[in-house]
Image: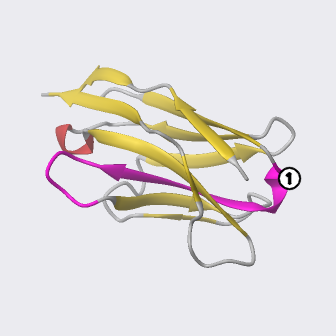
Amino acid sequence: QVQLEESGGGLVQTGGSLRLSCAASGRTFSRLVMGWFRQAPGKEREFVATISWAGGSTSYADSVKGRFTISRDNAKNMMYLQMNSLKPEDTAIYSCAARDLLRNEYEYWGQGTQVTVSS
């Protein structure tokens, strides 16, 4: 089992920045592919970014490409999402997720942290 806990959400003005953190515990963090997802009110959950187990490969949704940066520190069992140039449409609950590197589906999810971008 893996336990995930997000932090770092909050209220920010358009154009501002936030850094989300995800702390993982329960099993070998370095074997996990990690990702960030978000869900806005009344909308489906959507993919934001993912990072490979060693951190050498990342992928982003087109809507955040060039503004958000995903990273991880396997020594600290931590993952991060640096969000710059935030827009009101980035307002959502952001959740971190994890899956074993041999699996295709995300198995573990955090509770989420609220990000609100005011116009």
What residue sits 85% from the left and 53% below the top?
28
Q: Which residues are magenta?
A: 27-44
Indicate the quadrant containing the C terminus: top left, top right, bottom left or bottom right: top left
Colour basis? secondary structure
In this picture, is 76 found above or below 71?
A: above
12 left or right, relative to 37 = left
Residue 99: where, in percent of width, then height? 65, 64
What residue sits 81% from the left and 62% below the top?
31
What amino acid is found at the position of numbered circle 1 in the picture? Thr
How many dots with numbers? 1
The residue that disc 1 covers is 28
Residue 97 is a magenta residue: no
In this picture, is 37 found above or below 13?
A: below
Q: Is any atom of residue 16 visible in this view? A: yes
Give 12 or 38, whichever is nearer the viewer: 38
Determine whether the residue tagged by mark 1 lies in a helix, strand or loop.
Answer: loop
Residue 79: where, in percent of width, then height? 65, 42
40 left or right, relative to 81 = left
Give 28 or 15, whichever is nearer the viewer: 28
Quadrant of the rendered image containing residue 113: top left
What residue sits 67% from the left and 43% below the top?
3
87 left or right, relative to 70 = left
Q: Is any atom of residue 14 visible in this view? A: no
Residue 39 is a magenta residue: yes
